[in-house]
Amino acid sequence: MKALKLKRDWIIGWLLLLPAMVFLFAFTHIPAITSLVSSFYSTPRGRRPAKFLGLDNYQRMFDDPVFWKVLGNNLWFALGTIPLSIALAIVMALWVNDKLPGRGFARMAFFTPTVLPLIAVANIWLFFYTPGFGLFDQLLGLFGLPATNWLGSPETALNSVIVVTVWKEAGFFMIFYLAALQAIPKTLIEAAQIEGANRWTIFWRITFPLLMPTTLFVSINAVINCFRLVDHIFILTDGGPDNASALLLFYIFETAFRFWESGYAATLTVALLVMLCLLAIGQFFFFDRKVHYK
Amino acid sequence: MSCAEKAQAVCWASSQARRCFNEGRFAMLKSTLLTAVTATALTFSTWATAQAVDLQFYFPVAVGGKAADTIKELTDGYMSANPDVKIDAVYAGSYQDTVAKAITASRGGNPPQLSVILSADMFTLIDEDLITPFDDYLTTDEEKEWLTGFYPAFMENSQTGGKTYGIPFQRSTPVLYWNKEAFKEAGLDPEVAPATWDEMVSFSEKLTKKDANGNVSQWGVRIPSSGFPYWLFQGLAIENGAILANAEGNKTNFDDPKVVEALEYLVDLSTKHEVMAPGIIEWGATPKAFFEGQTAMMWTSTGNLTNVHDNAPFDFGVAMLPEKAQRGAPTGGGNFYLFKGASDEQLDAAVDFVQWITAPDQSAKWTMATGYVAPRPATWETDTMKKYAEGFPQVLVARDQLDHAKAELATYQNQRVTGVLNDALAAAITGQKTAEEALSEAQKQADAILAEYR
Amino acid sequence: MTSQRISYDRTLNTVAAWTLALLWILPLAYAVWTAIHPAAYEAHFTLSAPLTLENFQKAWAAAPFARYFLNTILLVTLILACQFFLCTLAAYAFARFEFPGRSIFFTLVLLQLLVMPDILIVENYKTMRLLDLVDTIPAIALPYVASGFGIFLLRQTFLTVPRELDEAARIEGSSALGVLWRVYIPLAKPTYLAYGLVSVSHHWNNFLWPLIVTNSEETRPVTVGLSVFSAIDSGVEWSVINAATLMTSGPLLIAFLLFQRQFVQSFMRAGIK
């Protein structure tokens, strides 16, 4: 009888899972595997079918200076965006959760980037960054400072892209922190205040530890986004100058859909997948120790 | 191009789109069926030639504006004169969208019969085995003669290996725009543009304005270098007597000393002479910078003529690019291509349509609506064009420059090879590499890419 | 002394919050400025600049935004409906059923949290070509309909539903799906709301994959429409592009402003924190 119920549970479980797994396999797991397979082949062109190359594409990738450059860019991009956007999100959430005058306006302001498509606001930022008559240069000009070619010099291009990304992300992450803050019992804070703790101590001793699960959740999102968010690059720099602001996914797009080299693009995709899997393993270990979701 | 015109154009495109939407995914099936039906009809009847021929025709609009509207007007005109031909003109977006759509549709077994695609994409399309030369469909002497009626500069990007793969249609070329008021203010003759490289530098030195802090409020010249810097740079290279790639599209000459010298000149404009803003200069913001008085001269496409005409708050002039060893400029823009997979009847009709639309009357209409350079000298001889040029003499500059123009850089794997050159140019402009280093590295990479095509 | 310090501290915080808020809203403010003034004032911020609605007219007429808008609405509705359906079933299976392979499948689901479809553009494009779906709205939606994030989130919520409620419903004769429908889904409403909002805002703004997989106006969503529209030879026309941006983002912006309180609360109740 018990065994029968178990069998029934098996079947129901599998059936419930089936539709989702079909789509997951079709658009995530199988493509990941076929990427690996295509990475060993040349790109088929009209007159020539794909031929097996072995590790040639990987050899090419290791010898490709652009690959190393975009990889380095992506790491710098991650370092620039993740901590900064999370820190800002916490600060914003604290402010908005506090009874500041005009907090409704502040909340709206912080939240607007989430709603505006990155591809559209990139045009606005393009104006801000324009040398000479752009907003930043007009403001700096008031102080007699010279015009800066923010997007057109290799030293500042990637950082300019990072600023736009932080602007976009911090407001979104703020929502998660805001929800978390509102769930913290007020009595806890009040008790601490009665004992004479100042705001700084309260934050580091009580609020921040209680926000830890949110921070982990948000940081996973931030890590994913730093490999995923490339929309604004199309408008702001198109990866330039000399690939100074190109990220890995942007390079994959360029290789596959501008150069029409799907073989090499698959190789690059595999590199990205490997990196993400390493990160995934690292983070799940981290997750397991700090938070018990299961 | 005024915005109202643009509006109309896109509106038309959208109503067109809506019509297509109803057919949705079945469009492919339907067109296959239609082809089959047509083929059957042709086989089984002796009056086959009287049957309707269906053509699908993709076109991009890069400059925006009235273009899409005019295309519809022209195709409608053709169809009413040739009731046995039905042309479905599909607005496919930008040049990149159009080539992507054509490649995708072809791989999916549903190619258009005719498409306007960048002339520089010729080798890519040949490599993908998608297009077929026009020569097979030009049988009479008169038709063969027709090929010789285009400006040779435009045909360079259209022929290879003795075959003609492209027919010039929406073509452009870069020119120099100058602000006459700024010239006057700097004590220059407002009616005279710099004719040589040296003059461009000396004029620019006079035009560059610095404030007390040493900050520049007006630059002398602006040669945009974002996105596709190779195009304007090619102008400099040609002027210096260099050719960037051979006619077979399998060898580049990036490390030619003349090319290096051209790049050095470009870099010197901002570093040595300090008459151009340093770093990469945004293409999209260039007309605005010109209107705002940020620069007294700019290099950009003739496709901007109407925009500048409508929006510049001052008198402006248009001139050919200045010379070094010779005058010179690249051509740009789109050609007609014939796609494989169509029946001979369809391709015959397509070729007939191309001949018709590039004929003087139609071509004049097209040029006046869009600002593209009419590709056949005969068009410029029509009364309508003569009258148009009288009222707007700047349009003649681009035409006259064609005598000195050369093919736009085009090779096999064109996007990759131009990408390599673009990166090299950016590296030199931003001072990471010297012109010589950057170009010889680019040449090595281009050699590696093109080796398999030799 | 202390009260003085507190008020000083408070003022400082208020000033800082306002400064940051002003910085954050600057792009939106600029969009509004350019959209309601003639193009000549794109870079000149004088209060006496004349007002105009012409940019909106131009933008509306310059690209088929009504069509793009409809496409986006179809797209996000399709994605959301499929996500709710698929993720609910899968989450229910993971939360309440014992079956062989459960933990392996769950790991595979979690893997999708990091290996998102956005990265597999090359292979997914080939799949769409194989299915003959290139340039259709379902092609934009399909890779996202089974969302690892959604399954994970709903599973967490379903796990918090007391077993007793489940068993009581079963004793009353409900089937497995009946219990899901009557017990689990109603209790997970805040999660659905929160997840729905994240999903809608994500797919409303998604760009790269739709750019690749669509190539005609009848399928393009707003984001791709905006980019095609701004990539013109004759230079960027900020006034028109910003008018277009405001028109297309307006509904979402207003919806979020109206519902932001509920949004935060649903997040709180959904346990996304």
Image (spheres, coloured by chain):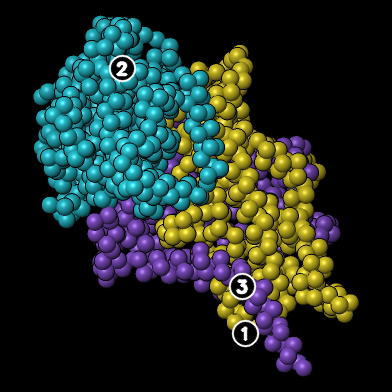
Furthest-front residue in this view: B46
Asked if residue B38 shows in the view, the reply is yes
Which residue type carries mark 2? Asp
> Where is residue B399 shown, x and y percent of the image?
23, 18
Does residue A193 lie above or below A158 as drawn? Answer: below
For mark 1, what is the residue? C100
Q: Which chain is yellow?
A: C
> Where is residue C113 shown, x and y percent of the image?
56, 64
Identify the element where label 1 is drawn.
loop
Residue B361 tag number = 2
Identify the element where label 2 is drawn.
helix
**Residue at (13%, 43%) from the top-left corner?**
B161
Find the distance from the CA under tag 2 to the CA under tag 1.
76 Å
> Where is residue B337 shown, x and y percent of the image?
28, 38
> Where is residue A154 shown, x and y percent of the image?
35, 42
Label pair 2/1, CB-CB below 8 angstroms:
no
Label pair 3/1, CB-CB below 8 angstroms:
no
Closest to the observer, C97 or A171? C97
In this rendering, do the residues under marks 2 and 3 share a single chain?
no
Label 1 is found on which chain of the structure? Answer: C
Does residue C153 lie above or below B265 as drawn? Answer: below
Q: Which chain is purple?
A: A
For mark 3, what is the residue? A18
**Residue at (80%, 71%) from the top-left corner?**
C178
Does residue B413 lie above or below A43 as drawn? Answer: above
Closest to the observer, B394 or B248? B248
Instruction: Mark 3 vs mark 1: give the one in front.
Output: 3
Q: In this view, does A264 lie to the left or right of B5?
A: left
Q: Is residue A109 left or right of residue B261?
A: right
Label pair 2/3, CB-CB below 8 angstroms:
no
Label 3 is found on which chain of the structure? Answer: A
Find the distance from the CA under tag 2 to the CA under tag 3.
64 Å
